[in-house]
Every structure is written in structure tokens, then in C-alpha cells.
Image (spheres, rainbow, N blue to C red):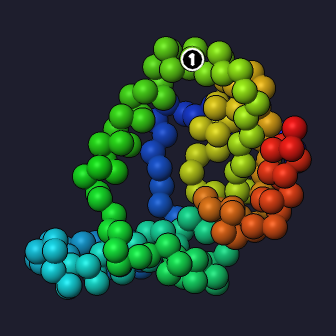
Amino acid sequence: MKTISWPSPPSNVKRLSRAPRNSQSELAALKQERSRHHPESAEYAEIDRAICRIQWSTDFSNSTTASEFVDSLIDERFVPNYDVNRKLTGDWRRVSVSEMFKESLTRVESPVIVVHGSNDPRPTWAVQSLVDSLPDCQVSEIDKAGHFPWLENPNLVKTVFRPFLSN
């Protein structure tokens, strides 16, 4: 287990996609095609799964095995709700920068462990700001893992959680 130090975010931070340029144009074409179909149609669902495969594959450390992991996450019974995702993201952006939220983190009395993949495309400063705000917090970086370390390196995640949970 190691403690990681990350810089604070620049004031003009934007999340950049790790998807290759050709995937970006493919995504744009798929989104346009999806807009021509009714959201409850089979065609819409098929195109949406193709979009998810491209977008979600960047969350994994190893591009060779990413498609296998993405396929394990795609379930025809549960489709992404983009409207809810947008609203939750907007709420999180507002709450996470509020002084009241930051101050409330300093009052968390339970020990906390933050598990972070070494190749997670999300901004590392966000993880560090959370870790810095919690009074009793450990951080563990899982090597060769992206945003889903429990899928990419489950055995290492178990070895990190077991001692933490036994205390």
C-alpha cells in the first residue's frame, strides 16, 4: 500500500477522452445513427451497446482485455440512463466543491480506504483531495488497473481489503 501525492487541478481542467481519434469519429457517427431510432427499439439498444463498448473500454488498463470486461458489464436488462447520469454528474460537481461538503468529510469518524487503479483515466487530483479531507483514510493504488480495479486485479484488491476490514 502506498500513499500517492497528486497536484491540485488546474482551474481550466477538462476531462479528455482516452479513446483514439478514430474511435471519436466512430462514436460521433454511432450517436448520430442512434438519434434516428426510438429509444425503446432494438436498433437503438444495439447501437447504444456499441457506444458503451467504445466509451467504457477506456476505463480499463489493458486494451487487449478491455472488451472482455466491457462485455461483462453490458446487460440488456439494464441500459444506461444518460439523463440521470448527466444530472448526477452536475449535482456531484456542485456538491464536491462546496465548503460544507469538504468540511463534513473532516468529521467522518470511521476509517476509510480508497482503492484507486494506477491507470484510471479519471483525474487523480480528485482522489487525492478526497483522501486529504478524510481524517482516517488510507489509499491503495492497484497496479495495472483502471477505473474498475476489482475486475482487472481482483486478487490484489482482496489483499488490500482483507486487513482493512479485519481491523
* In the rendered image, the vertical position of residue 36 relative to residue 92, given as above or below: below
Q: Does residue 31 appear in this view?
A: yes
Query: Residue 48's x, y, as percent?
Result: 30, 75
Secondary structure beneath label 1 = helix
Q: Classify mark 1: residues with Cα within 10 Å, few (<14), some (14-19) or many (20+).
A: few
Please name the residue shown 20% across and 84% down the image.
42
Looking at the picture, which amino acid does disc 1 mark?
A: Ser
Please name the residue shown 73% across and 56% down the image.
118
Query: Residue 154's x, y, as percent?
Result: 75, 67
Quadrant of the rendered image containing residue 31: bottom left
- The residue lying toward the viewer, choosing from 36 and 12, is 36
Tag 1 residue = 104
Left or right of residue 44: residue 84: right
Query: Residue 7's x, y, as percent?
Result: 68, 34
Please name the residue shown 80% across and 51% down the image.
161
Left or right of residue 148: residue 46: left
Q: Does residue 25 appear in this view?
A: no
Q: Give the quarter of the figure containing the C terminus.
A: top right
Quadrant of the rendered image containing residue 139: top right
Left or right of residue 136: residue 36: left
Quadrant of the rendered image containing residue 63: bottom right
Query: Residue 166's x, y, as percent?
Result: 86, 44
Please name the residue shown 49% across and 73% down the image.
73
Total numbered labels placed on residues in the image: 1
Left or right of residue 38: residue 133: right
* In the rendered image, the vertical position of residue 4 relative to residue 36, given as above or below: above
